[in-house]
Amino acid sequence: MRILVYPHAMEIGGSQLNAVQLAGAIAARGHHVVVLSEPGPLVDLISDLGLEHVEIPLSRRRPSPEVIGTLGRVVRERGIHLVHGYEWPPVVEALFGPGLRHRTAVLGTVMSMSVVPFFPKTVPLIVGTEQIRAAALAAGHRRVTLLEPPVDTDADDSALSDGAGFRREHGIAPDEVLIAMVCRLVPELKLEGLLAACDAVGALAEAGRPVRLAIVGDGRSRPEVAERAARANALAGREAVLLTGEVADPRPAYAATDVLVGQGGSALRGMAFGCPLVVVGEQGFSEQLTPESTPLFLRQGWYGVGAGSLGTGVPALRLALERLVDSAATRRELGTYARRLVHERFSLHRAAELQEREYLTAVAERVPLGPLLTDLARTGAGVLTSTARRKYQRRRGTLATDDANARPLAGPATNA
């Protein structure tokens, strides 16, 4: 089969990393895979995997008439059987381009926290949590498959990465407990957890615990995070929080980590390295990964809203971290559990098998022209409405920079 994979971005992040890694795994299963994307750090990984890359402009409208034309040309010239778009703009462009003109099969993946209302309902959809799958089916989507964010458990292994070198590079002593966050520094979904972690670690350091927080990543919220880190360091009387900036290969950071604080794909990737995990979200959410809390995360994803089992806000996060910092035995036990869970449920090999089945089904089960045209009209109207709303919000200075489906579906978390 000849497949065109179209990630929504090429900066270092969960959805796009999954897209590229799965493209490589699908190619390894004997299929011809072409990746179409804007330039960015992850393009090097495309090359390393031996995949053909077609570049589109970084600065463009979304959806883009130019990209729609490029998609049609690549599909025609390469004899593509299926276009796989990640997040809604690539899917819409693929459907209005080769999906309509050449009747090429289109499949979509949404690893954001919800699916936009105007997402094409005739397009087979892959989502990352059971909660989002149930919501999409209730909204009338034709076919929705759960594929939890995969992890390359072969490459993400502490035995293959220089964790000791990362600690030396950043002056982290062997007897210090290193807490890490590996993520983009952006307002949407991430910032609240980043700031809370700075406050919690600063308080632990002030109380005399040998702890450091390394924030690995970059983004437009770096000034706010740096300010909060400086406040934590002043409180502790030493460098308790450090910002490394973005690194092309964060595996040494994961390998060096004693406790990971995170969400989404970063949380899963840290688990592959045997890191005990505290998941953070919004409205004060934090929850430690344990056998008891696992069903919650499998249902709603590696994220939450509102109070966790220890309460809410910085006090709850501090308590969760304190329990891990104070007990090496607990860290080993929960780290071993985390790694076993990733290997059993989230491996890249398992995900590639499932995705290959979805490709074969999407090609075999073409949507008749009538329902397709109806769906295109509904989606087109939704895109135009969304675009007009964003223009209005931009004029008022209230525009969120992430797509609409960055708004979380998850409500207040419970372990029930």
Image: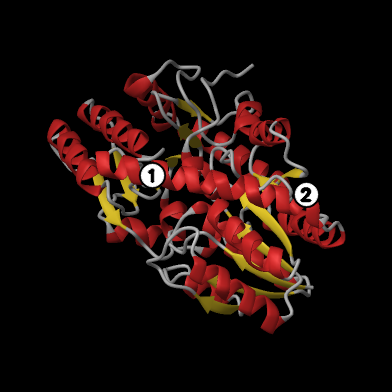
Image point (24%, 27%), residue name: 203
Q: How far across and how far down the image is residue 252, in percent?
A: 43, 59
Element under label 2? helix
Between residues 268 and 304, which one lies in front from this camera angle? 304
Q: Amino acid at mark 2?
A: Pro
Element under label 1? helix
In this rendering, would 258 be left or right of 19? Answer: left
Q: Quadrant of residue 131?
A: top right
Q: Does residue 306 appear in the picture of this structure?
A: yes
Image point (40%, 18%), residue name: 312
Report which residue position mark 2 lands on: 371
From the viewer's perspective, is residue 323 above or below residue 397?
A: above
Q: How far across and how far down the image is residue 378, in percent?
A: 63, 45
Q: Nearer the viewer, mark 1 or mark 2?
A: 2
Q: How far across and how far down the image is residue 204, in percent?
A: 28, 28
Q: How far across and how far down the image is residue 276, in percent?
A: 51, 38
Bin the neighbour count of mark 2 within 10 Å (Cα to Cα): few under 14, some 14-19, many 20 and up. few
Report which residue position mark 1 lands on: 390
Of labels 1 and 2, earlier in sequence is 2
Q: Amino acid at mark 1?
A: Arg
In this rendering, would 226 be left or right of 412? Answer: left
Q: Quadrant of residue 339?
A: top right
What's the colour scheme?
secondary structure
Q: Does residue 265 appear in the picture of this structure?
A: no
From the viewer's perspective, is residue 324 above or below residue 387?
A: above
Labelled disc at residue 119:
none
Q: Quadrant of the C terminus?
A: top right
